[in-house]
Structures are given as C-alpha cells and as structure tokens.
Image (spheres, rainbow, N blue to C red):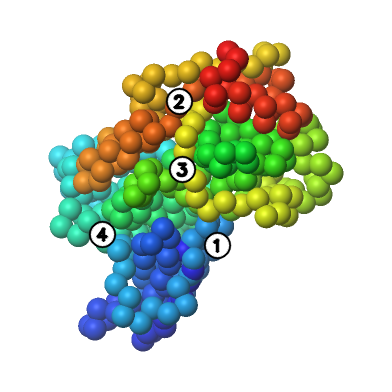
Amino acid sequence: MQKVTTPVKAGDFGENGRPAHASFYAFAGRFICVESDDPDSASIFRRHFSGWHVSPRGEALGLVPDATIVVRSGVTPPTPPPGLERFETAGGGLCHTDGRTYLFESDGSAVRVRGESPRVVEVWVGQGAAARRRAALARLVFDASMTALRRCGLFELHAAGVVEPETGEGFLFVGPSGSGKSTLATHLASAGWQYLSDDALILHASGEGVEALALRRQFAVTEPTVATGVLGGFEDRLTEPAPFDPLKRRFEPQELFPDRFAESCLPRAVFFPVITGETESGARRLSQAETMRGLIRMCPWACYDKPSAGEHLGVLAKLARQAAGHELRAGTDLLGDAAYVSAFVRERARGEGT
C-alpha cells in the first residue's frame, strides 16, 4: 500500500467525525484508510506497512476507502458481551464472536469488526508492556489488516511464491513456520526463478483465475539454510534475529536477487512441504480434494470469519482446480544445491519422479 498522511485538527475524533490523522494505502486495486487519534498510533501501522508490498497514496482527495481501520490508544478496549462463542487465535489470543461481530483480544490490545459496519475495523492499542512488545504489535497490525482485506475480497495465505523461468507459471509452497518455505524460495531465487515472497501472500479472484500477490518484502531464513551457502557470500547482508522471531535472520531479497521480484503470479502448482530430515526428498501428487483440505488447514479464517467465508472458500476452491497439488517430503538433498532444487521442483510439478 503507498501512504499519505492527512493531518486534520489535533485531538480525539471530534464533532466533525474526522480523525486527527488519516493515511491511505493501496493494494490490489483496493484502498485502505488508517485513521488514528494520535501520531504514535498512526506510526505503528505505517512502520509495519513499510515491510509489506503496499503502496502509500500520494493524493487522497475524494478517495473512498474500501475498508477503514480506526486506531485508538489510551482507551480501554470494549468488554466482550456474554454468550459469545470463544476460541483461541494464533499467538495465544482469543476471539469472541456471534458470527457477525468479531472481537480479538491479545496482550491487552483488541480488534473488533461489527456486523453492521463490516468494512470498519476498530483497533485498541494496549498500554501495558506486553501490548507494546514488537511481536504483539506485529500481530495486532496483521490481525486488523487481514480482517480489513478479507472484507475487500483479498485473502491471506501462509506461503512462499515463485515463478518458473521457462514457463512463467507460478509455484506456491504452503505450510506453517518451519516447513521449509523460505529455504525453498531462497534456493529457487538463487537458481534464477522470480520470487514474490518467502512467507506471506494474498489471494484474490481475477479475470484469469486466482492470482497470488506478494505481501512481505523481506526473506527470513534459519541458520541451517545460511550454512548451505545458498546466499553466495552475501551473509553479511543478514540482520540479527529479531526478538519476536529468534530462530531466523532476515535479508532484502532484491539486494541478492536483483530484477527477480514479481508482484503477482497465476499459480499452477501448489506444494505442501514437510521437512523430513531424510537424505532423499520425494513428492506425491494430490487429488483436488486433498489440495483443498490442505489449503483450508492453512486458511482457518475461511471457516471462522463467516461474513467473508463464502467468497474465501470460493477462492480456495478455484485455486485447488487451477493448480496441481503436491505433497513434498523435503530431505537434506534440497539443501545447498540451487540447481538441483530447481530441477527437482520443476520435474515433480510435471509429474516426473516420485
């Protein structure tokens, strides 16, 4: 998304209904407005958005947002009304819902979207030490932003995305943290493939089919991946592990793989990798139903977020029909030899080998 900050009168949301700060961002043809009552709250979203492939809008006059995120700090979050269904969310938070209104609570902060205002996402930033940790703020921004994007027909997928250089076809590697997505994406980019992201993509239905869009800018790799030498002597470009992700070090892929970034792709193959620790890797072609089940496991909000669930499930079903699914048992032979990884993935996508 690109950003413009429109200062209005200082203070809280006043009688004119206008916030003290409003920033507009664009992504996939949608416009998101972040409204806040103080500059510190606005900077939380601005800082995290800078790490995503979202574009600040330089001119917001007359622009009508597709969704609005309203950020408040120094205000006590609302108490969940009694009788709501409750379940745990990623990172140890709680979600309370009646199927139309959703209230997320985590580390003293909260996110709410109401059934009567589905395109307005309200955020309360907690004031305690736990709420101000980098990991807690990152989760807060992600939860609020993904809730807003789902109301715009854009759906997050925990996956790496790359583009095969010979055919231009998109390949996705879908799985939880630690499944090998970043390792595979880094090896393939090193072998000449274009890349979208190593970890976070957005799906949406286009005229040509389901399109995958890049979200996160940086790559994050483990020390074993660095030790393979796949970074080609650029290890000094790596950052130190972040407190909220202590097992991985980050780097800017455009510095290592210039001119290989792709904003989007049409996926034709979806791999579900699992690191086995065995010496040889293997793959198995999945049925359409198995592919759909794998996608739903990685997209729980396709079932939990009922206002957007129908469209969300429809996009996943189209993707399962559009792209061939594969179970990938990733062994140690997929570490260190980018050319071998490229050939292996290409052949398995074509149905060659096992």
Image point 21% across, 46% down: which residue?
A: 307
Q: Earlier in the sequence, mark 1 or mark 3?
A: 1
The outermost residue toward the bottom is: 9
Q: Nearer the viewer, mark 2 or mark 1?
A: 2
Q: Which residue is mark 2?
A: 325
Disc 4 to disc 1, C-alpha distance: 23 Å
Q: Which residue is mark 4?
A: 119
Q: Nearer the viewer, mark 3 or mark 2?
A: 3
| Cβ–Cβ under 8 Å for marks 3 and 4 | no
Q: Secondary structure at mark 4?
A: strand
At label 1, which amino acid type do we have?
Ser
Q: Nearer the viewer, mark 1 or mark 3?
A: 3
Image coordinates of residue 214 in percent, x first then y, are: 51, 50
Disc 2 to disc 1, C-alpha distance: 33 Å
Image point 37% across, 43% down: which residue?
A: 209
Image coordinates of residue 351 in percent, x first then y, are: 53, 19
| Cβ–Cβ under 8 Å for marks 4 and 1 | no
Q: Which residue is mark 3?
A: 266
| Cβ–Cβ under 8 Å for marks 2 and 1 | no
Instruction: Give the image quarter of residue 30.
Output: bottom left
Disc 2 to disc 4, C-alpha distance: 33 Å
Q: Secondary structure at mark 1?
A: loop
Image coordinates of residue 270 in percent, x first then y, are: 48, 31
At label 4, which amino acid type do we have?
Arg
At label 2, which amino acid type do we have?
Gly
Q: Residues within 10 Å of mark 3 (few under 14, many from 20)?
A: many
The quadrant of the image that shows the C terminus is top right
Q: Earlier in the sequence, mark 3 or mark 4?
A: 4
Q: Secondary structure at mark 2?
A: strand
Q: Earlier in the sequence, mark 2 or mark 1?
A: 1
